[in-house]
């Protein structure tokens, strides 16, 4: 189950820099996680200062 970025995202880029498989890219109006690339490591959740990343459904 890939993580998802919620509307709390402020586009700071901390999550993108923390992703070891480069699954996060800049979208509009927030960053997005490619579910096919995400390895569910959770590194992005700890890097996000806004708690904008949650496990996907």
Image: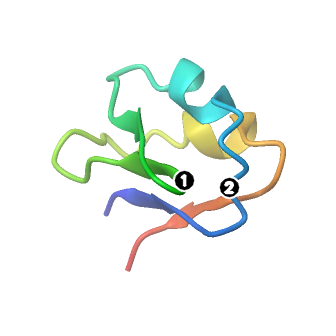
Q: Position of residue 21 (x, y in %)?
A: 32, 23
From the viewer's perspective, is residue 44 above or below residue 13?
Answer: below
Q: Which residue is rendered at x = 52% and y = 28% of the image? A: 16
Q: Position of residue 27 (x, y in %)?
A: 42, 47
Relative to the observer, which residue lies in front, 21 or 11?
11
Find the residue positioned furthest to the front.
28
Find the residue positioned furthest to the left.
36
Q: Which residue is rendered at x = 37% and y = 48% of the image? A: 33
Find the residue positioned furthest to the right.
49
Taking the image as shown, residue 39 lies to the left or right of residue 12, namely left
Q: Which residue is rendered at x = 45% and y = 39% of the image? A: 41
Q: Position of residue 4 (x, y in %)?
A: 46, 62
Taking the image as shown, residue 29 lies to the left or right of residue 10, namely left
Taking the image as shown, residue 49 lies to the left or right of residue 20, namely right
From the viewer's perspective, is residue 1 above or below residue 18?
Answer: below
Taking the image as shown, residue 24 lies to the left or right of residue 29, namely left
Write down the residue under mark 1: 30
Q: Position of residue 53 (x, y in %)?
A: 61, 57
The answer to which image quadrant residue 52 occupies is: bottom right
N-term mark: 2 or 1: 2
* The disc label shown at residue 14, or none: none
From the viewer's perspective, is residue 5 above or below residue 57?
Answer: above
Q: In whole angstroms, how far apart are the C-alphas of marks 2 and 1?
A: 6 Å
Mark 2: give few (<14), some (14-19) or many (20+) Cα within 10 Å. Answer: some
Write down the residue under mark 2: 9
The answer to whether mark 2 and mark 1 are in CB contact below 8 A is: yes
Q: Quadrant of the C terminus?
A: bottom left
Q: Dot 1: what SS?
A: loop
The answer to which image quadrant residue 13 occupies is: top right
Mark 1: give few (<14), some (14-19) or many (20+) Cα within 10 Å. Answer: some
Q: Quadrant of the N terminus?
A: bottom left
Relative to the observer, which residue lies in front, 30 or 56?
30
């Amino acid at each position: 189950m890939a993580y998802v970025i919620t509307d709390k995202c402020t586009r700071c880029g901390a999550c993108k820099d923390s992703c070891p498989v480069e699954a996060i890219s800049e979208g509009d109006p927030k960053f997005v996680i490619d579910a096919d690339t995400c390895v569910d490591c959770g590194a992005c959740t700890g890097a996000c200062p806004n708690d904008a990343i949650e496990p996907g459904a």
